[in-house]
């Protein structure tokens, strides 16, 4: 079973005291992290769908543009 990696943002405040400025920068960094994470997940999902539906047509196009110019039936046959 694979372990999940967790990324945590550490605050820039010194010591154990939490002032208003350190919590403000922490929440700003947290919101930037959430936006980055959402954008990354969205782009990876779109890339996965594009790869899923585009891989076989890409192979067919590359095969059709090769030098000996096979017929579509020859290109799709398993032999």
Image: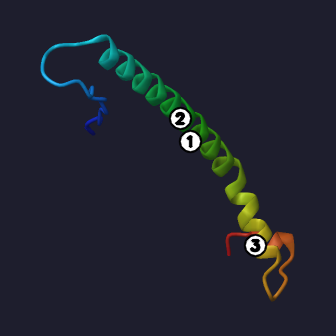
Residue at x 17% of width, y 25% of height: 14
Q: Foreground: 46 or 73?
A: 46
Q: Which residue is mark 2?
A: 41
Q: CA distance from mark 1 to mark 2?
A: 5 Å
Q: Foreground: 61 or 10?
A: 10
- The earlier-in-sequence mark between 2 and 3 is 2
- Asked whether the residues under the numbered discs 1 and 3 touch, taking CB atoms below 8 Å apart as contact, a structural biologist would say no
Q: Quadrant of the C terminus?
A: bottom right
Nearest to viewer (mark 1 / mark 3): 1
User: Are there few (<14), some (14-19), or many (20+) residues within 10 Å of tag 3?
Assistant: few
Q: Quadrant of the N terminus?
A: top left
Q: Position of residue 77 (x, y in %)?
A: 74, 69
| Rendering quarter of residue 48 | top right
User: Are there few (<14), some (14-19), or many (20+) residues within 10 Å of tag 2?
Assistant: few
- Asked whether the residues under the numbered discs 1 and 2 touch, taking CB atoms below 8 Å apart as contact, a structural biologist would say yes
| Rendering quarter of residue 10 | top left
Residue at x 78% of width, y 82% of height: 66
Using the image, determine if residue 42 lies above or below residue 55.
Answer: above
Q: Which residue is mark 1?
A: 44
Q: CA distance from mark 2 to mark 3?
A: 30 Å
Tell whether 34 sits left or right of 47.
Answer: left
Q: Which residue is mark 3?
A: 62
Residue at x 64% of width, y 40% of height: 46
What is the secondary structure assignment of the residue under circle 3? helix
- The earlier-in-sequence mark between 1 and 3 is 1
Nearest to viewer (mark 2 / mark 3): 2
């Amino acid at each position: 079973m694979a372990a999940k990696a967790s990324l945590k943002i550490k605050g820039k405040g010194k010591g154990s005291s939490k002032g208003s400025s350190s919590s403000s920068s922490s929440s700003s960094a947290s919101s930037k992290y959430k936006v980055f994470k959402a954008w990354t997940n969205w782009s990876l999902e779109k890339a996965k769908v594009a790869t899923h539906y585009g891989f076989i047509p890409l192979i067919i196009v590359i095969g059709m543009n090769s030098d000996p110019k096979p017929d579509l039936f020859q290109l799709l046959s398993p032999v």
